[in-house]
Image (spheres, rainbow, N blue to C red):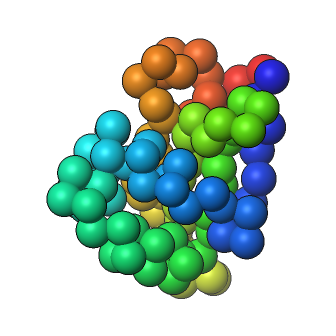
Amino acid sequence: MVSYKTGTECVDWPQLYHLYSQVELVASLGKRSEFNKIKSAFINSFKVVTAGKADKLVGAGRLISDGICYGTIFDLGVLPEYQKQGIGRHDE
């Protein structure tokens, strides 16, 4: 079963960096090992959601918003071996 968490307080940063090095999002910063930039991007996002199975981070995404009427989802990624299971849509 997949569990979802919001916020950056509970993010396992090494696992998040691994995720984005695998799925090549966050402007491919993971492939270039620019982990401080990834962390900064997530901390400065309006909302962050992570998906996990047991103790493994399998998906994540973030929302950029003005906090009033506009927002856009960015960097919604799921590890390749967990894709096509509805994790990014929160299907259960």
Query: What residue sits 53% from the left and 49% below the top?
Result: 15
Q: Quadrant of the C terminus?
A: top right
Q: Is residue 83 above or below residue 38?
A: above
The answer to whether residue 91 is left or right of residue 82 is right
Quadrant of res 2: top right
Quadrant of res 24: top left
Query: What residue sits 53% from the left and 21% below the top?
Result: 82
Q: Is residue 14 above or below residue 55?
A: below
The answer to whether residue 41 is left or right of residue 5 is left
Query: What residue sits 62% from the left and 41% below the top?
Result: 57
- Residue 15 visible? The answer is yes
The answer to whether residue 92 is left or right of residue 16 is right
Quadrant of res 86: top right
Residue 62: where, in percent of width, then height?
A: 53, 61
- Residue 69 visible? The answer is no
Query: What residue sits 55% from the left and 61% below the top?
Result: 13
Residue 53: where, in percent of width, then height?
A: 72, 30
Q: Of 56 and 59, which appears nearest the observer?
A: 56
Q: Quadrant of the N terminus?
A: top right
> How many numbered marks are there?
0
Residue 31: where, in percent of width, then height?
A: 22, 51
Q: Is residue 28 above or below residue 41?
A: above
